[in-house]
Amino acid sequence: MIWDLHCHLNGIPGRTPDEQMARLIECADRMQIDRLVLFMGTPFLLDPKPEEFRDQNDQVLQAISHWHHRAFGFVYLNPIYESESLAELDRCVANGPMTGIKLWVAKRCDAASVDAIVRRAIELNVVIYQHTWLKTTGNLDGESTPEDLAKLARRHPEASLICGHTGGNWELGIRTVRDLPNVSVDLGGGDPTAGIVEMAVRELGASRVLYGSDVAGRSFASQLAKVTGAEISEADKQMILGQNLRRLMMPVLQRKGVRL
Amino acid sequence: MTIDVNVSLSRWPSRRLPLDETPRLVERLVRHGVTQAWAGSFDAILHNDIAAVNHRLATECSIADNGLLWPMGAVNLKLPNWKDDLKRCHETHGMRGIRLLPSSHGYGLDDPEFAELLGMLSDFRMLLQIAIRLEDPRTQHRLLSVKDVELAPLPSLMKEHPDVPVILLNAFPAANSELASLLATSARVYFEIATLEGLAGLEKQIQLLPPERLLFGSHAPFFMLESAVLKLQESAMPAPIQKQITHENAELLINTLEK
């Protein structure tokens, strides 16, 4: 069972979200990927205004509308617009089919304006995927580091948070979230460097490690390879490739009556 | 049958890698059907005694199973008497090619010594590998932080040395498609797929570059070997093109050197 935590429509050929989704599923089938989590639309917007993130979420809602047996959507929010983000969270998750939250690079996630979103996520029992990077070449102004996420996680120990890209510089990202059991790490989006999975499993335990690809910027191939080629047990690979994400999402899936 | 043109032996400077012992790397290559692997040495990134690096590389390759590993010696154009290193690669070790690491060694392809090197490679009938990058600049160790190699000087240089086959390693995405296309169509410049990304990226790439200029490369053991292997599965390609990429193009390249 393979569940991909981290997929985008942006970069997939197609005139509409439906066409893009068909192409995405075609390629996922070649790699035996069962389920896909989508967030954000086209084009990528670093600091979307409310009408823009609503449009991005509409694209994802359209894309998954014929693929509920294969795909989930996470709602894309911008914490700079707190009240509008909370309204969008209710539109897409509380009252819609989406099953998680995506936060990107508009605002660093240790900001107080993120707290209201986290509190609502806890009420709705959904995970928050927070993009994180710690770039040797320097971060964007609003781009969160693993340390920012660690601060957020300490403020909200009951929240289920995902450290996107394992912080990019994964040796540092893994160290930063090591003592935070409510934080899992996403393997997607970086080069397929050898050793990332072995270190993550050693330091965090396999149950906190999640496969994600970051297609269409990345390939399924390079990101699956991190897990399939890792020097870990088959049981750990199965957890990372799908079982862990299924477990994290199970509360909201059950509440929505999603049949697996 | 697969020829991997981009593997390395020895130790990555800033971390141990799961497959950085040659027997373990060889076992993994064989498991995935690699029948020949062109290997450089990570030691060349920082070592100044390049002759010793190349001697160890040649020795290590010679004891691997069934001639699986073909050594690609290192030459650092910023070291004194680099021409002697090149001669030893050719005359002492019988290497078919060399691998340059311009970013790590601090020069660009507009360096006059690079043009001189091309002339010597032409005389020796050797191929040239150029590592456009070894690691994403965003994740590099702060003490090993370097930029990608600029390809802009290459088209004019290749006109002067059209007989030297050049393989650009880890060239995606640094090679923009326009420049890559110019190089691939106007000269004997090849690209390997270790850093090729995107959904079904290979399927897209064969529309942009001539398939006869694409080679299988993994950048193992720094990258997971399986990444390159799975790229062939993710992209739908006609079987003849897949054969070209996995081994036929590399075989042809070598055959032309040996004529």
Image (cartoon, coloured by chain):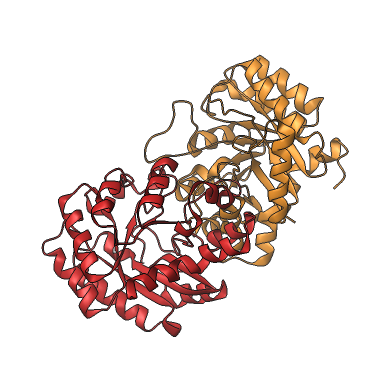
Chain colours: A orange, B red
Where is residue A125? Give x, y as percent: 75, 34
Quadrant position of the N terminus of chain A in the picture: bottom right
Q: How many marks can you see?
A: 0
User: Residue at point 68% right, 31% down?
Assistant: A15
Q: Look at 76% across and 30% down and name the residue there.
A: A62
| Residue closest to the eye, A246 or A61 | A61
Give the x, y percent position of residue A80: 57, 18
**Residue furthest left in the image:** B80
Pinpoint residue B162: horizontal percent, then vertical percent. 29, 57
Residue A230 visible at all: no
Point out residue B67 in the picture as x, y percentages from the top left corner.
41, 82
Give the left or right position of residue A96, taking residue A55 as reference. Answer: right
Q: Is residue B256 visible?
A: yes
In the rendered image, the vertical position of residue B120 relative to residue B186, given as above or below: below
* Residue occupying image coordinates x 25% and y 50%: B157
Quadrant hosting residue B242? bottom right
On screen, B64 above or below B210?
Answer: below
Q: In front here: A185 or B109? A: B109
Query: Looking at the image, is B226 positioned above or below residue A184?
Result: below
* Front-lying residue, B42 or B141: B42
Quarter of the rendering containing residue A12: top right
Q: Is residue B226 above or below residue A155?
A: below
- Residue at 53% of width from left, 76% of height from top? B30
| Residue nearest the viewer, comparing A51 with B39 | B39
